[in-house]
Amino acid sequence: MPEQFRFMLTSPGPSGLFVAIASASASWNPLTASPWNVIEPVGLCRYLARQGHRELLRRYALWCARHGLSRSLTGHLLVSLTERLLEGDAGPEEVRDVRRKMRPLAQVASTVGLQMGSPSAATFMAAYSALDPDPLQAALRAGWYLHLQAGLLVLRRQRGASDASAGEAVGKAIKRVQRRQVDYLLNRLAPMLRPPGPSGEHSPPIPQPTASEVTTPL
């Protein structure tokens, strides 16, 4: 397993993520290699949090959690609860109770499961994270575990490859996930940035983000 990706597995949470990804492949510099690095998911999520878009953050977390659910039956239950939470059919008490019951499984998945290189563990943790009481943390952590899931799936296919080759493949896979995450967020943010029509049917637009607002520096 590439040492840089091992760092991601042993350092759970969004902090330091892009440092780890940047070093995973010498040919991929998150600051310069792609226009997607001007607006990336972590910075965009933080921007949305500052603008008060809690529901959009929760829906993004749910979108991340839905990926690869066939690998985690328990994840289906958590995703269903997140859907009901967004629809107003589940309350904070039910969410707290489910998270409390699932905490031992989450502890195993986030340690033993990830260290064993299990994509199912990353899938479960994305679904578990989507129910975090703080929508920003739900979005950041679900998004981060989706990156791990993509990397772990690549490593399964790259068994026997050199660390350099595997690291290159992991970096590219995570970059593709980033692009889809940015697409999802921008597609839902775009209507909010449009000015109101002549009849005033739209609410006033929120301030458009600048590159510095939505870019996470290394």
Image (cartoon, helix red, strand yellow):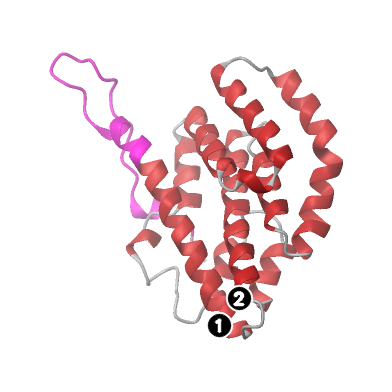
Residue 192 on image: x %, y %:
32, 30
Q: Quadrant of residue 184?
A: top left
Q: Is residue 126 visible?
A: yes
Residue type at mark 1 is Ser
- Labelled pair 2, 1 in contact (Cβ < 8 Å): yes
Q: Can you say whether 57 is above or below 30 in the image?
A: above
Select label 2 or label 1 by which is in front. 2
Q: Nearer the viewer, residue 63 or 4?
A: 63
Q: Is residue 100 left or right of residue 199?
A: right
Q: Which residue position is annotated with label 2?
A: 158
Q: Which residue position is annotated with label 1?
A: 165
In whole angstroms, how far apart are the C-alphas of marks 2 and 1?
Answer: 8 Å
Q: Which residues are magenta?
A: 187-216
Residue 91 on image: x %, y %:
68, 17
Q: Can you say whether 170 is above or below 161 in the image?
A: above
Q: Nearer the viewer, residue 147 or 22?
A: 147
Task: Bin the neighbour count of mark 1 within 10 Å (Cα to Cα): few under 14, some 14-19, many 20 and up.
Answer: some
At a point 17% along the width and 21% down the height, the residue shown is 197
Q: Quadrant of residue 111?
A: bottom right
At a point 65% along the width and 69% down the height, the residue shown is 156
Q: Nearer the viewer, residue 214 or 75?
A: 75
Q: Is residue 63 left or right of residue 82?
A: left
Residue type at mark 2 is Gln
